[in-house]
Image: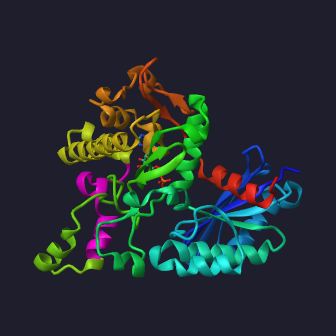
Amino acid sequence: MADAVLVLNCGSSSIKYQLIDEAGSVLGRGLAERIGEDSGRLTHTGPRGDVDRSEPIPDHETGLRVILNAFDDAGPALDDAGLVAVGHRVVHGGDRFADPVLIDDDVVATIRELVPLAPLHNPANLAGIEVARKIFSTVPHVAVFDTAFHQTMPPHAYTYAVPQQWHEDFGVRRYGFHGTSVAYVAREAARMLGRDPGDANLIVAHLGNGASITAVAAGRSVDTSMGLTPLEGLVMGTRSGDVDPAIVAHLGRLAGASAETVDEALNRNSGLLALAGANDMREVHRRADAGEEGASLALDVYCYRLRKYIGAYSAVLGRVDAVVFTAGVGENDPDVRARSLAGLDRLGIEVDAACNEAAERGARLISPDGSHVAVLVVPTNEEVEIARQARALALPR
Ligand code: ADP
């Protein structure tokens, strides 16, 4: 028996899943996609091979049943794996959940109350929870929230200086996201530094399609760049990050654009896509190397914004043990790492060019020996973290 946890990440039209054993190894994984569309698709990798099937998947319940069939066909058998819990990724826990939680009807109701804070994500997460509780009715279900790790932020970091009625009535404050990733990466970084996780001061840059940066003091989040929604902060693939909020009214007056239209543009048509014409960082580099000015500017803006936050969070933390890069860009892009840290040697932050550019993939140190602040690259693994947290609640020791 592997004491396995099934980790589910349900989107509105997809279910991503991994079956993870106690050691953190993936026993099986896959993706059900195009749920609710004319033709659905299921891809699965198990010990007995791969499954790639096209069939209609009208809803999430059918999606989970199709996934179970794939486990039957390509393994591993869920009974043999000793399923001990199902771990659900939930995007928004508001200020109601500072930790993962065993799911019961009250928890489901609370996640539903939080839908206005994450109108695209929480309903899909709930759909997954409801069908999984039906299908896996004998094991505990655990919700792991993207926002939970940041609930340790102090009021001066999470409070916006706006009418406080907005906070009380509509929940307007900083929440932060990517918390599961940051929790995992921060613990790995502390281990690499030989420090107790509760004693590590870190600046963690999660640079994927969405991007955020977090100040971690003594193992706890004390500030993070994403806010009420994932729009705030760093430049991202299609999101602007920080802008003057008066843009919304300005475009309303001059272009007749509704707040919804501007919000949509800031989330979907901004960031690297707006400046470089591509949201994939590899393509942005290709275009910059080919002499496209928009792409060069996009890289300048991206790295400059990152450097500003690293400076700001150095001031927040006082003592910084490490700057840590993770996710697609953070793990794979030596140019972004070097440029965003350039000129920070006065803060004790330096990069060893050879280590930074080495074609290595694992967790590694890229600062010179003896430098004041370590610079680390740590591959993230949100699924393993969700499995770890779910197992800890399901099998308390
Ligand atoms: P998500 O946020 O969807 O989980 P990822 O963490 O996979 O995304 O990150 C996706 C981003 O990582 C994309 O912008 C992609 O271009 C970038 N990326 C992946 N590989 C590289 C690479 N070798 N160099 C630069 N960027 C990369």
Residue 56: percent from left, percent from top: 63, 76
Magenta part of the chain: 261-280
**Residue 59 visible within the image:** no
Residue 85: percent from left, percent from top: 77, 62
Residue 258: percent from left, percent from top: 24, 81
Q: Residue at x 65, y 76 (%)?
A: 107
Q: Is residue 5 above or below residue 368?
A: below
Q: How many marks?
A: 0
Prevalent SS, magenta region: helix
* Left or right of 263 in this view: 70: right
Q: Residue at x 46, y 79 (%)?
A: 116
Say if the magenta span includes residue 275: yes
* Left or right of 170 in this view: 266: left
Quarter-wise, where is residue 60 in the image? bottom right
* Left or right of 345 in this view: 50: right
Q: Residue at x 88, y 60 (%)?
A: 79
Q: Nearer the viewer, residue 349 or 173?
A: 173
Say if the magenta span includes residue 24: no
Q: Is residue 90 above or below residue 214?
A: below
Q: Nearer the viewer, residue 396 or 156?
A: 156
